[in-house]
Structure formats: C-alpha cells, structure tokens
Image (cartoon, rainbow, N blue to C red):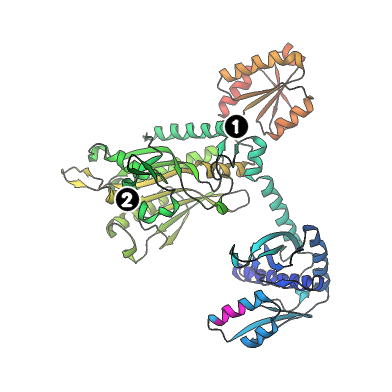
Amino acid sequence: MSNKENNEQLEIIRHSFSHVLAAAVKELYPDVKFAIGPAIDNGFYYDFDFGKDGIKEEDLKAIEKKMKHLIKQNLQFSNFDLQLNEALEKMKNEPYKQELINDLKKAGEKEVSFYKLGNFEDLCKGPHVEATNKLKADAFKLDRIAGAYWKGSEKNNMLTRIYGLAFESKKELEEYIKMREEMEARNHRKIGAEMGLFMISNEVGQGLPIWLPNGYASRRALEDYVLSLERRYGYKHILTPVINKKELFETSGHLSHYKEDMYAPIEIDDETYYLKPMSCPAGMMAYKHEPKSYRDLPLKIGELGNVYRYEKSGQLHGLQRVRGFTQNDAHIFCTDEQLTDQFLEVFELLDIFYKAVGFEKYTFRLSLSDEDSDKYVGKREDWIKAEDAMRKALKKAGYEFTEAKGEAAFYGPKVDIQAINVFGKEDSVSTVQVDFNLPERFDLTYIDKDGQEKRPFVIHRALIGSFERFFSFLIEYHAGKFPVWFAPVQVKLISVSEKHIEYVQKLAQEFRNAQIRTEVDINDETVGNKIRKATQEKVPYMLVIGDQEIDSDKLSVRERGSRDTVDLSKEELIDKIKRSV
C-alpha cells in the first residue's frame, strides 16, 4: 500500500472514531446538540453543545469507556441519503445540523448523506470503515476538551470540542504520546521560563518579548559570532532607524501591499512615520548614499535590525510568532556575472553557521517562476539568469534540493533552507531571495566597465532570519542544552558552606577575566539542592567548592549530562572551555 493510500485509510479510521465518539456522547448525554466532527492530523475531534452545564476533563474517561463498549459490539456503519426537506425534518432538534443542511441547499445540493451506527444517525458524508471491528479499541485515546466557536466566529455560540488521538495500532499511539511528551518537555516557552531566557509581559505588550539576562547572553554570543563570520566574508554592517517616513514605504510599495501588517502611523511635526516592518527600504537608501561602479561590486551590507509587524493576538506564540523582533538581514548588490559565486558563498556561510549551532540535517527548496510572467516584476531574462545561477550554485555546492515551480514571490526566485528538528519535521530557518522589485522602485544603479548605467542584482539573505524565531528553534532542538559557546552560563560554582564563599567569588572572577560566563550559588541551601538547580539550568560545567578544592590545585568538575566528576586544574578547565568555544 502506498503512502497516499495509507494516509487515506488512516483518515477514514480517524473519521470513524469521531462518529463513535458522537454515538457514545449521545448515549451518555441525550440532550446534547451536535455540530461537526472531522479527522485531523493526529486523530479527530467533535464539537458539541452540552448546554449551560457543559462537561469537565474528568468526564472523558466515562465517554472513552462507552466508546470502547460500542466498538466491541461490532456495529455496522451504514450510509443513506435524504432529500433536503427530509433531512431538515430528521434534524429538526439539531440546530447546527439544520444550519449545515441549509448551507448545502444554498450551494445547490439536492440531497445529503447520513451514516447510521447502531441507534445513532448523523449527518455525515463519510467515508467510514465497514464496521467497528475495523477499529482497535487500544489505538485511540480521548485527549482533552477545549472551547470552539461554531464555524469559528466569535459571534456564534461557544461549543465544547472533544479531541481524541487515533492511530492504526496501539504501538503507533504509544509512540506518538511518547513523542508528544518529549515535544512538551522541549517546549521553548517551558524551557525559557526554567532557564530564565525570556519573558512576555502584559504591561509591556503581547508579542513583545523581553530578553532576560540568560537569554540575552546567548543571543549576544550568537550575534557576535554572526557579525564576526560575516566580516570574514567581506560584509559591512549598518544600523537603520526603527521608524521611517511614510514616503519611504510608498516608494518601496509596502504601504500599498503590506499596510495591514504594519503598525498605525505616527504623526511628528506634520510628517507621517511608520515603525518599520523590515529593514530593506532603508538598506536601499544606504546603497544610494554614494554613486557605485562595477569595482564596488559585489557590495555586501548586513544589519541586525529591529522590526515591528502587527500580528493578530491569537497568532502570537512565545518567541515563534511575535510583533517585535530582530532580523539578521543582509543585501548583496552584484552583477549578473557574480550571481553564482555569491549564492555559493551564501551557502558556504550557512553551512559554517549551521554546523556551529549544532544542526546536522537541513534541506533546500528552490522556488521558481512559472510561465505566467505577468504576475512577476522585472525582465524575464533576468529571472532566467537568477534561477539558473541559484540552481548552478546548489549543484556545485553538492546539495540535494527540490524545485517548486510557480512558488517564487512576485519579486524574485528564492531558496528556503529547512532545518530538520529532532522529530524529523522541517522548519524554515533561512531564506535566500533575489529581488527585482526594490532595485527598480529605488532606481538603484552602478556604472559598468563601458561607463554605462546598469541596474544591480540584489540578493536578500537572512542567515538567521528572525533572532526570536530562530532562538525558539534552537531551544527546542537542543532542549536548552546549548553548545558551550552560546550557553548563557558556561560555569556554575557552588559553595559547600559559608566559609567557602570568599574563595568561590575569587575563582568566579578569574573565570570571568578569561571571558567565561560564570555564576555562583552561595545561597544557604544544601549542596544537593544547588546541584539540582544547576542541572535544571543545563549549565555545561558545574563545580562544587569545599575544603578539598581550596586545599588542592585541582577542581572537581561535573560536565552536563554526567553523574561523574573529573579533576582538572583551573588552567585546564579554562583551556577546555576556550577550545570548545
């Protein structure tokens, strides 16, 4: 059986479990009103109206027990169709079903489909398994309840949604539950709180994260490395204002195409300003600051720029979806002959950086134009040059990649880099994009060898993209156990008692003088408690300082993840950390 057939069969199984759920609820709560119950990617759900009393999480056990009872009876799923008027009569006590039937009537349907399971009949287009003996009672589990507005509109009634997990076998269900537990343990918001990395404050504003000392220490280590790496490759860095005049965004086209995602205008001295949603327009002005010749190209300009975009409150999620964030943006201005080499260099940069942060697997997706050239800006011949250069660079670099025809942005082709997380799923972490729009809008030029004015090619390149989103990915990828070089605290010194505090503080200063991020725990607690806290903070190196360490030239060092300790001198430990950094 093909993957497609497997997926289709699993969807049928999950949809059938949803129908069994509805039948079980009907037996236990005869007055309930039914809405909809589809299959979803890990199981199923059904929306119910239980009236003013509702149900609680603890009620799920009884519902699940009733479902298993129905499954064991080997009930048949039988299908029948009714004319719309007959269907409305049958569902006269089901207001949500009646509304669905009337929607189908407006759409021109003449009849609707029902499925019967035992004594329970439900408006449903199916398909379902033949009978409940095709469902395994140990391969599903009712998961949780949540509120859900009817048809997703806040103007409608709030319903109770019961979620269930469902798979083809007990083993698959158990594996999924185990994986989900691991995902929850790696949740960047949970780890972020435990390690003191960031916070979201209602007083500051939703979607506007505050980087706490530990998180900012890691972020600065990443930023410093990125800037240093880019400088090695000839990048120059700028910093542009957070607010820009309205006219700049009119020129760039953002006010006509992107206004809904921008914050409201700011009026200053009879002029209108906006918080910038991206740094590109001001970056184009930096290029125009002085005339350019072919000898100035390629010109690589980078920026760590703070940008602000209006995201709906329901879409905000920790660091993954925010309203204020920092982009590691760069613009490469080059000639058409330089395109392939510039793409190759960007891929080399990405490779170095990803290996440094610990990524082992990532894939490339090349998004191209299609035959409909009217929807794209720029000259067709320039598109062909850029797409050929991207393809050639990917092949020359030895990367496997997929091509997605017709998925290029209107302003240029792009390469998306997808990192593979610990659960095998892809997450887009970087984009390399050619832009034929802004160079035209800002009238960017350079003088070629023959003294003629020409338009440069512009490559947008975000090594990290959004620092916030990228950092959330790093948290979950490493489960907070960051590589030593960007761990927020690299060494934790723990005093055994009060008489050891002075030595601990002196030793900590020596580590700090060696540019090692060091913290001390001199609280009046047991050593066991202090060790547990340091373990939870995922510190790479932990040192317990007592009489023995003060009297010896060796330190007892515990590395993260190990129960054993090794004896190292202060100089050996400093050298070990510096080599890992």
In magenta segment, residue 553: no
- The secondary structure that most of the magenta stretch takes on is helix
Residue neighbourhood size for the residue with mark 2, other residues' Cα within 10 Å, grouped as few (<14), some (14–19), many (≥20): some
Residue at x 42% of width, y 57% of height = 367
> Which structural element holds mark 2?
helix
Q: Which of these two is toward me, 423 or 533?
A: 533
Identify the magenta region.
100-105
Q: Give the distance between the C-alpha atoms of the residues marked 1 and 2, in whole angstroms.
A: 40 Å
Q: Earlier in the sequence, mark 1 or mark 2?
A: 1
The residue identified by callout 1 is 214
In the rendered structure, which amino acid carries the disc numbered 2? Glu
Label placed on residue 378: none
Label 1 close to label 2 by CB (< 8 Å): no
User: In the figure, is residue 285 to the left or right of 178?
Assistant: left
Location of residue 491 in the rendering, given as x and y in whole percent from the top left corner: 64, 25
Residue lying farthest left?
Answer: 451
Q: Which of these two is toward me, 428 or 240?
A: 240
Residue lying farthest front?
Answer: 270
Quarter occupied by residue 385: bottom left
User: In the figure, is residue 370 to the left or right of 83?
Assistant: left
Residue at x 63% of width, y 18% of height = 508
Residue at x 37% of width, y 61% of height = 369
Location of residue 532 in the rendering, given as x and y in whole percent from the top left corner: 75, 32
The residue identified by callout 2 is 250
In the rendered structure, which amino acid carries the disc numbered 1? Asn
Q: Is residue 25 above or below residue 393?
A: below
Is any part of residue 331 visible from this angle? no
Location of residue 220 in the rendering, given as x and y in whole percent from the top left corner: 51, 32
Q: Quadrant of the N terminus?
A: bottom right
